[in-house]
């Protein structure tokens, strides 16, 4: 199952807006960032094309050395948590210093930057044991990826997502939240943030 995502906002200073499309080109979900005052973190709202709110996700500030969790809230409950991880002992800027984990529906997934092509990621359906202990994550016993995220190089879409099978009840929600964070946080194969 494949998805495409278009970023509607090109100005990095403006709140981001994203549209997620099915393989056949149907608009499935819209993600919009909103600010909610000085005392609350910005929030991403996920809505159906008719404007019906499906879920929200807060964007807490990233402090140096922090391990922020991004919770997807649906029906007033945590549906999924996406966490940005930094491997202990890995030098900032080294390959795979930063990666993401995803908890949803009782399962744990791993999202690792790929070295090639730039701006692409592998999605794994399980977490290898002792992941943080490897100096180079390609040395770990990684399973075959269940999916990939690519930055589109041509056409009118910005991201392409390929999944081998439907993984979650709300697959489109998880995919859009994941791509939103990858782009918003600018996680790259060098662990950097733009």
Image: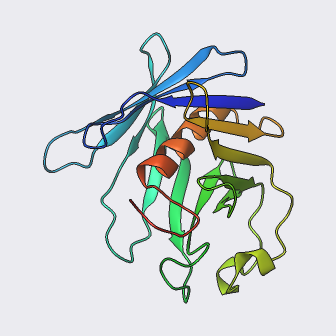
Determine which quarter of the picture holds residue 131.
bottom right
Of the pair 166 and 146, the residue shown nearer to us = 146
Q: Quadrant of residue 172?
A: top right
Q: Residue at x 36, y 31 (%)?
A: 9
Q: Considering only vertical position in the picture, is 138 above or below 187?
A: below
Inspect this view and state whether residue 107 appears: no
Q: Residue at x 15, y 51 (%)?
A: 39
Residue 95, image x, y percentages: 61, 74
Task: Tell me if 192 is positioned left or right of 135 in this view.
Answer: left
- Is 181 above or below relative to 176? below
The relative height of residue 178 versus residue 101 in the rendered view (above or below) is above
Residue sitting at x 67%, y 30%: 3
- Return the x and y of residue 58 as percentages of the image width and height: 36, 46
Q: Nearer the viewer, residue 144 or 6?
A: 6
Residue 76 visible here: yes
| The one of 104 and 138 positioned closer to us in this rendering | 138
Quadrant of the rendered image containing residue 5: top right
Q: Quick one: 29 or 121, which is closer to the camera?
A: 121
Residue 111 location in percent, x, y? 65, 58
């Amino acid at each position: 199952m494949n998805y495409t995502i278009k970023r509607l906002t090109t100005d990095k200073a403006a709140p981001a807006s994203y549209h997620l499309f099915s393989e056949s080109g149907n608009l499935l979900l819209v993600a919009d960032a909103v600010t909610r005052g000085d005392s609350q973190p910005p929030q991403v709202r996920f809505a159906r094309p008719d404007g019906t709110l499906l879920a929200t996700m807060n964007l807490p500030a990233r402090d140096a050395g922090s391990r922020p969790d991004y919770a997807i809230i649906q029906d007033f409950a945590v549906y999924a948590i996406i966490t940005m991880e930094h491997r202990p002992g890995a030098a900032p800027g080294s390959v795979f210093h930063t990666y993401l984990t995803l908890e949803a529906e009782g399962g744990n997934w791993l999202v690792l930057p790929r070295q090639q092509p730039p701006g692409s990621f592998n999605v794994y359906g399980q977490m290898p044991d002792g992941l943080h202990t490897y100096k180079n994550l390609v040395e770990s016993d990684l399973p075959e990826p269940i999916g990939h995220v690519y930055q589109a190089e041509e056409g009118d879409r910005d991201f392409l997502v390929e999944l081998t099978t439907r993984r979650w009840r709300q697959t489109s929600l998880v995919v859009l939240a994941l791509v939103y964070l990858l782009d918003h946080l600018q996680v790259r194969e060098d662990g950097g943030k733009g």
